[in-house]
């Protein structure tokens, strides 16, 4: 190894250290460009080192040449990284105006379904109904059998749903809360059971595998169908206006006898017929009826002494009618453009 070789190696080492030290002091693009010219320009320090290769023996030149190429590439990469960082910092400073007032966090609000559910609760509690709740993961016994729906009953076909094992099911309605309530208290009973339910419906404009329901129950001496009609009528008028009328149509439910479907007169066209009511003047709401004496047998109520009525309604159905929403899926899409309208 010649003295010239050792001298150039020392110069390379010193040049690298000086470059790194000066790069740390660079504050802006102008200084960075000056540093680039100083080291990588046509008359820069790296080019001067390349010119000194002529002083070396032919056998030593490849080693120093390789080292100089590494040094040049390292300088270029560090300059590029520093330039990118400086550009990002400048962009951030340019985009942010420190003179602007601070931004307050956006305040949330109740989901439209919860708003309607609260209104339903308020109407029924004003008529003396208590609010009762039950588990969403329910025993098959409470969800079906105690409601007069044995395992072989064909009415299960509409509600057979998400089973966790042989005993448990995601509840298909909030009617099990009625059984649980009657088990732990004697008449009189006057309650509503709001909550989330699950069925194997394919999602479309009017169906969802997850939905909310309110079931009502009243049990006492001398309860008649006229009492049921009066309560539903009061609810309809408080929810949709004093001009709303109610009609009942014969139907079938395993846990009520007699059973009925009930409809509200269309509050959009006042019963004349429109797109909302499909030209009939009536809007289907849900089902109701007098509690079947067989159900009283599961909770040790004497059907010769007590009678009662039960009714149900879908919260999504009421909300869609109240706000004239044509697709149930809007409630579950979490689209703020929709939710912020309420």
Image (cartoon, rainbow, N blue to C red):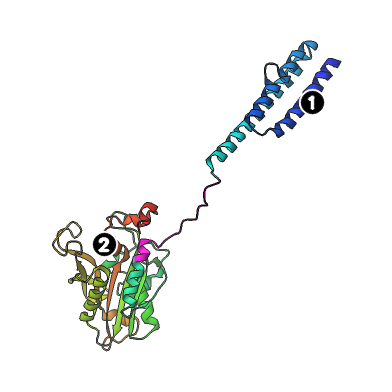
Residue 44: x and y, percent?
Answer: 71, 19
Q: Is residue 167 visible to us here?
A: no
**Callout 1: SS:** helix
In front of the other: 35 or 202: 35
Residue 78: x and y, percent?
Answer: 66, 30
Q: Is residue 185 left or right of residue 205?
A: right
Q: Is residue 44 left or right of residue 213?
A: right
Kindly identify which numbered label has been placed on residue 337: none
Q: Residue at x 64, y 32 (%)?
A: 28
Please state which of the two labelled residues, at mark 1 or mark 2, is closer to the viewer: 1
Q: Is residue 283 left or right of residue 110?
A: left
Q: Which of the 4 quarters of the picture holds residue 54?
A: top right
Residue 322: x and y, percent?
Answer: 27, 63
Q: Residue at x 42, y 65 (%)?
A: 165
Residue 80: x and y, percent?
Answer: 62, 29
Residue that numbered label 2 is attached to: 321
The quadrant in which the N terminus is found is top right
Q: Residue at x 35, y 73 (%)?
A: 193
Above-or-below relation of 272 to 183: above
Kindly identify which numbered label has been placed on residue 14: 1
The quadrant in which the C terminus is found is bottom left
**Callout 2: SS:** helix
Magenta residues, start to end: 98-115
Contact, mark 1 vs mark 2 (Cβ under 8 Å) = no
Q: Among all residues in the image, which is located at the extreme front?
A: 99
Q: Is residue 285 visible to us here?
A: yes
* Marks 1 and 2, how far apart at CA: 81 Å
């Amino acid at each position: 190894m010649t003295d010239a070789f050792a001298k150039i190696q020392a110069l390379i080492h010193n040049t690298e250290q000086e470059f790194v030290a000066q790069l740390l002091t660079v504050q802006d693009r102008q200084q960075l460009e000056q540093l680039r010219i100083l080291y990588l320009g046509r008359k820069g320090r790296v080019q001067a080192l390349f010119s000194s290769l002529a002083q070396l023996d032919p056998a030593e030149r490849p080693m120093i040449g390789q080292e100089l190429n590494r040094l040049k590439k390292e300088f270029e990469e560090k300059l590029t990284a520093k330039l990118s960082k400086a550009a990002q910092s400048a962009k951030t400073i340019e985009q942010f105006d420190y003179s602007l007032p601070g931004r307050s966090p956006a305040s949330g609000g109740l989901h439209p379904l919860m708003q309607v559910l609260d209104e339903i609760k308020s109407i029924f509690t004003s008529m003396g109904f208590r609010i009762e709740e039950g588990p969403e993961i329910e025993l098959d016994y409470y969800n079906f059998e105690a409601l007069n729906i044995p395992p072989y009953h064909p009415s299960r076909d509409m509600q057979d749903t998400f089973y966790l094992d042989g005993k448990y099911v995601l509840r298909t309605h909030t009617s099990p809360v009625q059984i649980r309530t009657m088990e732990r208290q004697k008449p009189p009973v006057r309650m509503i059971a709001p909550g989330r339910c699950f069925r194997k419906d394919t999602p479309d404009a009017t169906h969802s595998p997850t939905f909310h329901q309110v079931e009502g129950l009243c049990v006492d001496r001398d309860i008649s169908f006229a009492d049921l009609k009066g309560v539903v009528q009061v609810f309809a008028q408080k929810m949709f206006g004093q001009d709303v009328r109610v009609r009942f149509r014969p139907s079938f439910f395993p846990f009520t006898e007699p059973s009925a479907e009930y409809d509200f007169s269309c509050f959009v066209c006042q019963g004349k017929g429109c797109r909302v009511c499909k030209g009939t003047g009536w809007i289907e709401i849900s089902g109701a009826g007098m509690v079947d004496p067989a159900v009283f047998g599961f909770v040790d109520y004497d059907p010769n002494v007590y009678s009662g009525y039960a009714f149900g309604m879908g919260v999504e159905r009421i909300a869609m009618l109240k706000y004239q929403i044509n697709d149930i899926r809007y409630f579950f899409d979490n689209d703020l453009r929709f939710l912020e309208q309420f």
